[in-house]
Amino acid sequence: MVVFRSLWLLLPRQVRRLPADLAAVVALVAATNVAALVPVIRETLLRVPLGLAFVLFVPGYAFIAALFPEAGESPAPAATSGAPGENATDDSDPDGWYDSIASRNSIDGLERVALSFGFSVAIVPLVGLAVSLTPWEFRLTPILVALSSVTLALTAVAATRRWELPGDDRFRVPYRAWYAAGRAQLLEPDTRADAALNVLLAVSVVLAVGSVGYAVTVPPDGERFSAIYLLTEDDDGELVADDYPTEFVQGESQELIVGIDNHEHETTEYTVVVLEQDVEVIKNGTVSGNATVNETVIREQRELDRFSTTIPHNESWHQKYELEPTMTGENQRVVWLLFPGGEVPAEPSMADSDYAVHLWVNVSEP
C-alpha cells in the first residue's frame, strides 16, 4: 500500500483531482494504446474489448462530459399551487410536466450514456477522415494517436468545467450506489425465483460476450492471406500503382516502392527474394481461332536481392527500393517473391511462393 501511495503522489495534482469517470476515460485511453501498440500485448485478445469500448463509447463520453459538466436531473412534475388539480403551467402542458430540455440545465445518466454512443459514432469517422488527409495516411497508429489526443483534450475541458462549478452541482457517477444496489440484487435476492433469474442473466451475459469475442477474434477459414505489390511516387508525393520504371541502363538504378499487406491474423515475419530473369516467350500455336498460347521459358535466373521484415496483423509496410538490373536485353523480368514465415527454399522460384509480383524492363548496355 505504501508503494502504491507513493506512486499515486508522483502523479500531477490535476490528474489526482480528476473525477472518477474522467479518470476511467484516461485509463482506458492509455490501456487501449498499450494493447494496440506494444508488441507482445497487441497479439492478445485484450485489444478487442478495449478497442471496441474505446471506439464506440469513450470519445463521445468525453465530448458529452465537456458539454454537460452539471449534475443532471430526470424530468419532474411541475409545482402546483392553488386548489388541488390546478396546474401552475399554461394550458399547453395539461399533464403538468415541463419540457425535458427547457426545464433542466443538464442531462441524466441514461441520456448521457445514449448520447455518448451516438457522438462516438460521429467523432471517430471525422477523425479518421482528417488523418487520411495528412501525410501519415489512414493507418492504425496515426488514427489511434489522433483519436487519443482528441479524447484527452475533451477530457481536460470536461475536468476544467467541472472544477469551476460548486461541489454540489458537479456531475458525479453514483458508482457506489450502483454497486450496493447490484450486490444486493445479485447476492441477496428476495425470492428463489429472483436468484434463479439472476443466475440465468449472468450466464446469458457470459455467453453473449464469449460469442461476440469469438466471432471478432477467430477469423473464418479462407480469410488469412498476404499481398505484395509495387508502387511509385507521383509529383505530389502520393503512392500510386502507375508509371513504373521500365527503361534501365546497366549499372544504374531507379527507385520504386515495395508494399506488403499482412492479413494473417498474427504478427508475421516476411522474407522477400528479388529474382532477375532472362526469359523468352515462345508461341506454341493457336487454340479456338485467334487465341494464341505462349510459353515463357527462363533462360537464365539470378538472385538480385533479399530482405526481411516483420509486420503486425492488418497493417501495411512500404519500403523504397533501388532496382538495379545486371543482365542486359529487352523484356527482362524482375520478380519479387514473398515468403511468409521467413522460410525460403534453397533455390527459390515463382512456383515456391503464393505471393509474387513482377516487372518487365529493358536493360541496355552503358
Image: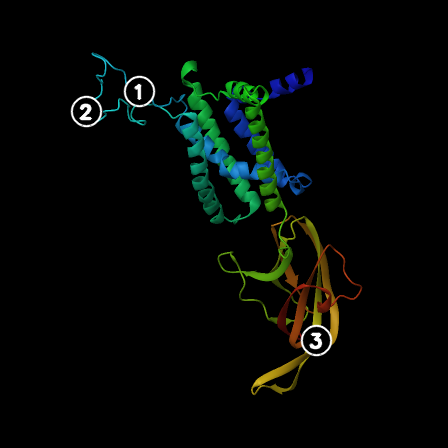
Q: Please give the name of the residue rendered at 61% of the width and 61% of the height, measured from the top-left corner.
A: 229
Foreground pick, 4 / 183: 183
Q: Amino acid at mark 2?
A: Asp
Q: State the image coordinates of residue 116 (x, y, percent, origin top left).
A: 45, 33
Point out the tag, 1 or 2, that comes first from the N-terminus: 1
Quadrant housing the N terminus: top right
Label 2 sits on a secondary structure element that is loop
Q: Which label was assigned to residue 278?
A: 3
* Cα–Cα span, label 1 and label 2: 15 Å
Mark 1 vs 2: CB contact within 8 A: no
Q: How is the image coloured?
A: rainbow
Q: Which label was assigned to residue 77?
A: 1
63 displayed left or right of 208: left
Q: State the image coordinates of residue 140 (x, y, percent, origin top left).
A: 56, 45
Front label number (2 vs 3): 2
Q: State the image coordinates of residue 325 (x, y, percent, origin top left).
A: 68, 69
Quadrant housing the C terminus: bottom right
Q: Reply above or below: 117 against 130.
A: above
Front label number (1 vs 3): 1
Q: Amino acid at mark 3?
A: Asp
Q: Amino acid at mark 1?
A: Pro
Label 1 sits on a secondary structure element that is loop
Q: State the image coordinates of residue 326 (x, y, percent, origin top left).
A: 71, 70
Mark 1, other Cα within 10 Å: few <14 / some 14–19 / many ≥20? few
* Cα–Cα span, label 2 and label 3: 92 Å
Q: Which label was assigned to residue 91?
A: 2
Is residue 114 in view?
yes
Point out the tag, 1 or 3, that comes first from the N-terminus: 1
The answer to which image quadrant residue 77 occupies is: top left
* Cα–Cα span, label 1 and label 3: 88 Å
